[in-house]
Each structure stands twice: as C-alpha cells, then as structure tokens.
Image (cartoon, grey):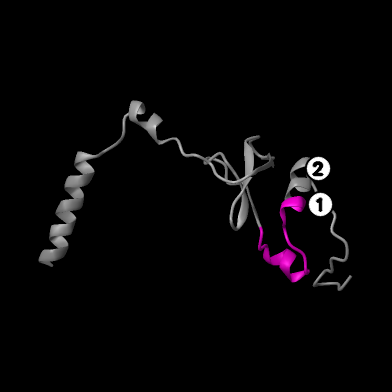
Amino acid sequence: DEFLNGITELMQELVARYQGISEEKKDQFHGKAKGEIIGKCPRCGADVREGKVNFYCSDRNCAFTLWKNDKFLASQGKKMDKTTAKKFLSKGKIHYKDLVSRKTGR
C-alpha cells in the first residue's frame, strides 16, 4: 500500500506540473509521416500512405485505413496490395474476380 501510494503521489505531482504544452512548443513536435504516398483519402482528402500492415490516412484526426491482411479478402484468397489500394483510392471501387458468397456459394 505504501509503494502504491508513493506512485499515486508522484503521478499527481507530475500531472500538476506538466498539465499541457504551449502552442509555441507544439510546433516542435510535428510528426514526420513515413511510407510512400499512394493516393488521397476518400474521407478527408489527405495523403494515404503505406505502413507495415495497412494503408492509412496521414491526417491523425481521420480513421481511414485499408488493412493488408483483411480477413474477408484472405478468406477469398485475395489480398490488399499496393496496386489494389491505389486502384481503390483512384476509382473508388475494386473489381475482384472469383469471389464466392459464403451464404449462397455463388
């Protein structure tokens, strides 16, 4: 209990001391997006970049993502690669051949 109380007091002190960062200092922390730009986000228009496991919108406020290991596509023997993602971002849709419905089998 004494140990946990010490941690709690330390955390309260740190939070009180470092409540926020000034706008002036925020400019020092602009993240540098990595990955090749493959297109524009259909939601917000920002750049979409390639990551290790996905293609993501470079605007942190936008949640747009295309997963490389998408479970539906994997169940159909397909994958989301860079070429497919580029086509989807430019045309707004993708045409896959030989997809089969689990419900109907067609």
Q: Residue at x 84, y 59 (%)?
A: 96
Label 2 close to label 1 by CB (< 8 Å):
yes
- Pointer 1 residue: 94
Q: Quadrant of the C terminus?
A: bottom right
Tell me the residue at 33%/30% (across/down).
25
Q: Is residue 103 above or below residue 26?
A: below
Q: Nearer the viewer, residue 103 or 72?
A: 72
Rendered residue at 78%/44% (across/down): 92
- Which quadrant holds residue 69? bottom right
Residue range corresponding to the magenta coloring? 68-84
**Image height check: is 51 above or below 1?**
above
In magenta segment, residue 82: yes
Residue count near mark 1 (Cα–Cα under 10 Å), binned few <14, some 14–19, many ≥20: few
Q: Amino acid at mark 2?
A: Lys
Residue 105 drawn at (x, y percent): 86, 73
Please identify the quadrant where the N terminus is shown: bottom left
Identity of the residue drawn at 77% across and 52% down:
84
Indicate yes or no whether the magenta region holds residue 96. Answer: no
Give amino acid for label 1: Ile
- Does residue 104 appear left or right of residue 55 in this picture? right
| Picture coordinates of residue 41, whole percent (x, y) | 66, 40
Report the disc number at residue 91.
2
* Residue 65 rendering spot, x and y as whole percentages: 62, 50
Residue 62: image x %, image y %?
A: 57, 42
